[in-house]
Each structure stands twice: as C-alpha cells, then as structure tokens.
Amino acid sequence: MRDLSVQIGSLTLANPLIAASGCFGYGVEYAGAVDLSSLGGVAVKGLFLSERQGHTPPRIVETPAGMLNAIGLQGIGVHRFVAERLPELRRLGATVIVNICGSTIDEYCEVARVLSDAEGVAALELNISCPNIKEGGIQFGCSLTGTYDVVSAVRKVTRLPIIPKLTPNVTDVAAFARASEEAGADAVSLVNTFLAMAIDVETRRPKLSNVLGGLSGPAIRPIAVRMVWECSRAVKLPILGMGGIATTADVIEFLLAGASAVQVGTANFVDPFIWTKLLAGLEDYLERHDIARVRDLVGGLELGQPEPA
Amino acid sequence: MPFDVAAEVIENRRMSPDYNVLSLAAPDIARVTQPGQFVMVKTTPGLDPLLRRPFSVFEVLRDDGGRPVGISLLNKRVGVGTEHLYAVESGARLDCLGPLGQPFVPARPPDRAWMVAGGVGLAPFVTLAEALAGLGTSMTLFYGARSGRDLYCADLFTRLGARLVLATEDGSAGERGRVTDPLRRALGDLDRGTTATIYACGPTPMMRAVAALGRDADAPVFVSLEPVMGCGMGGCYSCVVRVRAGGESRFVRSCLDGPVFDASAVVWDALEARH
C-alpha cells in the first residue's frame, strides 16, 4: 500500500485525483458510478449567488481529441446548493471544493461567506477564468490587478483555503499565479479551457449558440502541462493541474511538471468509471518505480543529461 | 445505477445504405432496461470522436429461455460516430453505458397507446410496445418516413399485436403525406369515453405537431427528445431542454429529467430554434 495523500496548503487530500468543476455536476449525480469518498476531492459546478439558466443550446461541439463548451454557468445558486446538495455530499463523504463565481467582487465575497458558514466545504475554488460569460469571471482572470483584487477580497472574508482557477487565455500565466500568491491564495488551479470557435461550413454558422466556447480534452494537454510547469517555477503555492487528463500517465505527467494534485474533467464525460482505473494505475506506477509517497513525484521532472546506463 | 459494459457486437444487420441494427452482448444492461431508456456508446476506441453518443435501446435481446442477454441499437448514418457504428463488424467491442434516463410510463387498459414514429424515431418504441403488450393495452404504431424504403422493423410491432398505420412522403407505402395526418383523423374518430395516450419520437417539427394535436384533443402526449448530449450522467449540462414548470420555464437536463418529457411542458420554440 503506497501513500497517495497530498497536501494543498492546510488541506490533506486522500489522493491527488479531483473531479473538475463543470464536468461533474454537483457530484451527487455520479454517486452511483464512483464512491465519492474515494476521490481526493470533488470540485462542484460553479455557483453564483442566484440561480442562472446558462446559454441556449447547442452548448457543446466536438473537435479532434477535444470538445468546445459554452454552457454559460447554468447553476442553482449558492443557497440552494447549501440546502439541497451539500448535505448529500457530506453524507457521501466527499471532500467538497466549491467553485465560486461572481459578477462583482462583492458577489464573490458573499458567496464565499455563505459557504464559510456551511458545514462540509473543504475549500473554495475561485472561478476567474470562465471564457463563456460576459460579466464577471474572466474579466478578473485576464487582469493582474483584477486577479489580485478578487483574491485578496475573498481572503478577507473566509478562512477556507482559496484556490483561484486560472485561465490559459493570457500571455504569461505564471504572472497570474504570482498575483494570486501575493493576494493570499492557498493554491492555484490551472488551466481552464482555451477560448475557441468552430464553424459549420455548410450553413456558415457557428456551431455553438454562444459563437465562442472553451476547448478541453486531450488536445490541450501539452499546453496545460507547459503552463503548470511555468507556474510551478514561479510560485511556492501548491498547484492543481488540469487539461486533458485521461490516463494514469497523464496524471503523472502533471505531477512531474509540478502539480500537487490534478483535476479530471472531460475524460469523466467519456468514462464516468475512470476514477477507479486512475487510482489503480497510480498505485501500480508507484509500485513499479518503488516510490513510497505520491507527493514525492511532485515537481520530479529531470532536466539534466540522462545518466549513462 | 448504470453499468459500463465493453459489449461485443453479436450482429450488424445493415438494412439499407443508411440504416443498421446493431446487436450487442450486454446482459447487465438488458436485465434492467425500462421502456424508452438509452445507452451512451463509444463508437470508436480513439479520441476522434471523443465523446459517447446516446442511443435508445431498440430491443432487449433474449435467449431461448427468455433471459435478457443483450440489446440492439437502431442506427442511422448521419455523422462520424454513426458512420463507425454502421461499419463495425461482429466481434468488435463497444463501450456501452446504461441504461440511462427516465422511461416511458406505459398506458394501461382501457386507455389506448398510440406511438408516433418518424424515421429513426422508431428506436424507443419496441421496448414500450413490449411493456404495453404485457399490460394488454391496445396499441397502434403511426410510422412515417420519406419513402417505404425507410420503414423498418414494423414486424416487431405487429408481432406484439400493434395495429400499423404507415405514411410516406412519396406515397410508396401507406398513405401519402405526413404521419400526423392519420393521427389527426384517429383523434377525431375517438369515441366519447375512450382515451388515448400518445408517445412520439422523430424530427422536432413532427413531435411539435403531435404535441399540438394532443393538446387540442385533450390527449396526453409524451415525447422522447434527442438533443446533443455530452455525458449522459448529468455532469456536463449540454443536453438541456427548456420546459415549463409552474409559471416559469427553465433548462433541465434531458439525460436525467428526460429523454421522455410531457410534451405540454416542452417549450417548442426553444427546441426548434436549433434546427
């Protein structure tokens, strides 16, 4: 038995596998496919203060080794989440990371306050990177001062660990990790989806009603790995890495690049039973390489010349 | 809760250049499938296409002793995924997740059951017809297509005791015109005191027309909708359909709250705007 636990600031996770926000509903939907308590964490769908209807369909379209989505953060709002979903998540033993959104800094703070008063929230992930909504979200995530301001404001209203989720749609993602660190974040998660577009050439119309959407899936993985590596060199904060993870090797790759834990999103759409496979694969990898603790892999990338055999 | 099965292709019956019926060994799924439920199928092992595709369970396949051993899918070639399912050979394995979704509630006698199918929209009705036959409910299949060549598997229904009403746009089988024409007449001919529950699946304009006919005749209509679906589990929120509840309308996930909906609750304008 190997030690799969990882540390995200003050938070200890049973293992490095976290269900990514926006790809796992509110978690309870998947209770029949996976024992939620066996996951390192469950990042639930982004929540504003109030209910939101999201964008008109079509909301997704497939592209080679990936998909675009423009859901538009349909959600039940933080109050209903606390009343209707959180008790069930607690009963199921999930380590709950709540992804929070806001149109204004005040809204982020209010959502954070509501969740800080609730029982059973392990951490807050700050969604400052959704590419699909006009107001809020990415307007903070694409500006260094915006990122700093929203993180430091939420820092003042909660003692829960806060994890800004960073967008890859910037020139230098590491600068945003640094701004998050200076503002008092406990970790950063990256990457959210890449802003993208697909056109139906027969009708000349966009394939998504929102015109633009976010690209996820294996297609983005090498860019995400690069960005995690850049951030790991820029900050001391733990990193939750994500972007196209679909196999055990992908998980290891992100850990070696410097992520302390990973999130799996799109692959869960393809295979909701992926979690047990990834956990078994992780155990097997540690066994084969005789590594006692999964955390010993974090940042384990070798850059020197290979030693002669 | 759903099973995920690497289901072996037992048979691929190609009925035309576009349509095939794919038989899959999946006893776990077959045992618990209810009428109108669906499965999510990975049409090819690779990354393109990446996601699974939703398919109604067409038939529950049984062995000689009547034990469920598998399911079949009615497939029409329309895109990359369905192209793979048309070409796949016996012996291949396809990841198959299910059964999923809210089933049809079969009408009971003395209520009659009228199924209205347009083209590949026939898919969810064999399982419903079996349940109706088990209850002894009188049933009719209104089955429409562009041409007689596109009407398949009607024998599955007559074998279960269903009356068949066919309509084709070119008049090559049944009456010429839309399948909603004989449905309209049948509703007009319903004796006082006799009720019919209508089930519809097919192109959106057809289902919308059936919903309107049912509303005018005070007959309940249930539709099986087929929006683009990402995961089938309620995770992605891509398959939403706008429905009315109380005084307002909202998007609900058709994988969890559907694919079967009360047609009177569906906001048809929102659905048809996509086509």
Image (spheres, coloured by chain):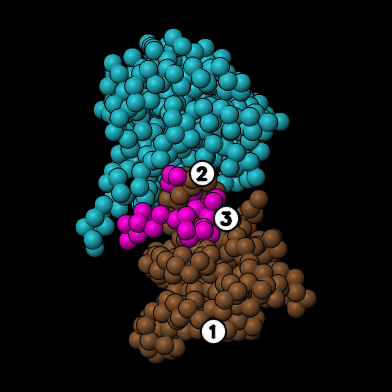
Chain colours: A cyan, B brown
- Discs 3 and 2 share one subunit: yes
Q: In whole angstroms, how far apart are the C-alphas of marks 3 and 2?
A: 13 Å
Of residues A125 and B255, the one drawn nearer to the viewer in this rendering? B255
Question: What chain does mark 1 sit on?
Answer: B
- Residue B132 in the image: state x and y as whole percent: 65, 72
In primary-sequence order, the first of circles 3 and 2 is 3
| Residue name at image x 45 percent, y 49 percent | B244
What residue is pinned by disc 2?
B235
| Residue name at image x 70 percent, y 76 percent | B136
**Residue flagged by tag 1: what amino acid is it?**
Leu
Is residue B267 inside the magenta stretch? yes
- Residue A239 in the image: state x and y as whole percent: 46, 23
What residue is pinned by disc 1?
B164
**Secondary structure category for the residue under label 1:** strand
Residue A127 quadrant: top left
**Secondary structure category for the residue under label 2:** loop
Magenta stretch bounds: B247-275
What residue is pinned by disc 3?
B101
> Which label number is shown at residue A174?
none
In primary-sequence order, the first of circles 3 and 1 is 3
Is residue A5 something one can see in this rendering?
yes
Question: What chain does mark 3 sit on?
Answer: B
Q: In whole angstroms, how far apart are the C-alphas of marks 3 and 1?
A: 27 Å
